[in-house]
Image (cartoon, rainbow, N blue to C red):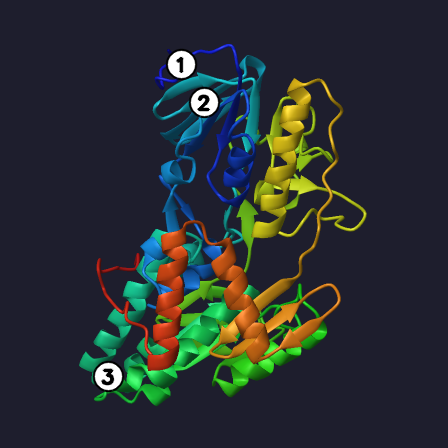
Amino acid sequence: MSSMNIPQSSLARVIIIGGGFGGIALAKKLANQDIQVVLLDKHNYHNFQPLLYQVSTGGLEPDSIAYPIRKVLQGYPNFYFRLAEVVEVIASEKKVMTNIGDIRYDYLVVATGSETNFFGNKNIENLGMAMKTIPQSLNLRSLILENFEQALLTDDLHERDALMNFVIVGGGPTGVELAGALAEIKKGILPKDYPDLDTRRAQINLVQGSGRILPAMSKIASEKAERFLEKLGVNVWKNIRVTDYDGNRVTTNTDTEFEAATLVWAAGVKAVTLKGLDAKELLARGNRLQVNEFNQVVGHSNIFAIGDVAQMQTESHPNGHPMMAQPAIQQGHNLGLNLIRLLENKPLRPFEYKDKGSMATVGRNKAVVDLKRFKFQGVFAWFVWMFVHLYFLIGFRNRVVVFINWVYNYIRFDREARLIIRPFKKNR
């Protein structure tokens, strides 16, 4: 036995670090093979990140978008999950060191995903809010509700406005979807919840550094999404970069300033690196590990990286594939086949990304969808967005719960999960 109580066996051992979209897709592919699979993650659940903004805004409870990793891979022979934080990878010894012990591997797959990139701005990191994990989303939910409770109590009009103002930095899908959800809360829920507060004064500001929101999508999708947001009452600011934040005042690279007690940072991500695999020559832009067309990390034949943490340069993607769920799932799937081929001494299959399109929702009956041949916006796009997200949720119960929640919210114009379960205090 190793120190993690994982039996030694004659089977090749594959260690997967990370239970995100890529790690789970790979584990499923290796499920019934003669391979010992060990999955390590610091959480015991898989988190469906595309719907985190709905947890932040009280539309869904966190357990409807999280799923126990052990349950995903229940009943698979030779499969082991350990709740562990990886401390270091020692490639020369084929060893992974964790906070619960060390373990040796034959093949190692890094699927650690990405984290919020504050680009070195400590004030924004300390005083702003990120929305990349379930605890962060719950913190944001508490803060939003606490700010409205606080706004009721203050006589200072200036302070009251700041408590009801939001600045969302980053006009990608996360920023756009959060802005839309907040705008709907302002319109449909706040007047009912806080009848003694002039919630019309609440402002939702979406700040984008470049000339258009949703820059990775088509021009028509960007323009339409912007129109949808403006119709909902969101102020869309373009070509403005947020430079600093002191907890109330948001400073930008222009004369524009905002007074806001809530700043949500959705302006970039960087890969989560591991000690031992963080040498300069291995890393590309955004801390991503450079990999070849088989997802092998440069200079290592038995270490692979997939998903957000992997940078595979191709003609169509000179900066690597987009840091989204689809590339991770597809890379996990392809690497699973390749590991089986490797053990059978067959040649490896290069990874080819099939772009299934991109989409973003702006709120009730409003979404934009870009597919290869079609681009459409509005109600039909919204139904497509809902169907796709339900399809990719892991677990039958989660799909049912989310679907019922959505139908209920749609009919009742409501979001029931407006609960301050654990109060949140910003660092000062």
Mark 3 lies on a secondary structure that is: loop
Pointers 3 and 2 in contact (CB under 8 A)?
no
- State the image quarter where residue 150 is shown: bottom left
The percent position of residue 243, horizontal first and vertical second, equals: 52, 64
Q: Is residue 196 visible?
A: yes
Residue drawn at 60 percent across, 73 percent down:
368
Mark 1 lies on a secondary structure that is: loop
Which of the image's four quarters has the N terminus? top left
Horizontal side, residue 322 vs residue 98: left or right: right
Horizontal side, residue 51 vs residue 408: left or right: right
Residue drawn at 44 percent across, 22 percent down:
97
Q: Is residue 254 visible?
A: no
Q: Earlier in the sequence, mark 1 or mark 3?
A: 1
Residue bearing mark 3: 194
Q: 187 above or below 119?
A: below
Mark 2 lies on a secondary structure that is: loop
- Marks 1/3: CA distance? 58 Å
Which of the image's four quarters has the C terminus? bottom left
* Amino acid of disc 1: Pro
- State the image quarter where residue 247 is shown: bottom left
Which one is in front in this view, the residue at disc 3 or the one at disc 2? 2
Which one is in front in this view, the residue at disc 1 or the one at disc 2? 2
Which mark, by number, is residue 7? 1
- Marks 3/2: CA distance? 55 Å
Which mark, by number, is residue 78? 2
* Amino acid of disc 3: Tyr
Residue drawn at 55 percent across, 33 percent down:
110
Residue placed most toward the observer, 16 or 238: 16
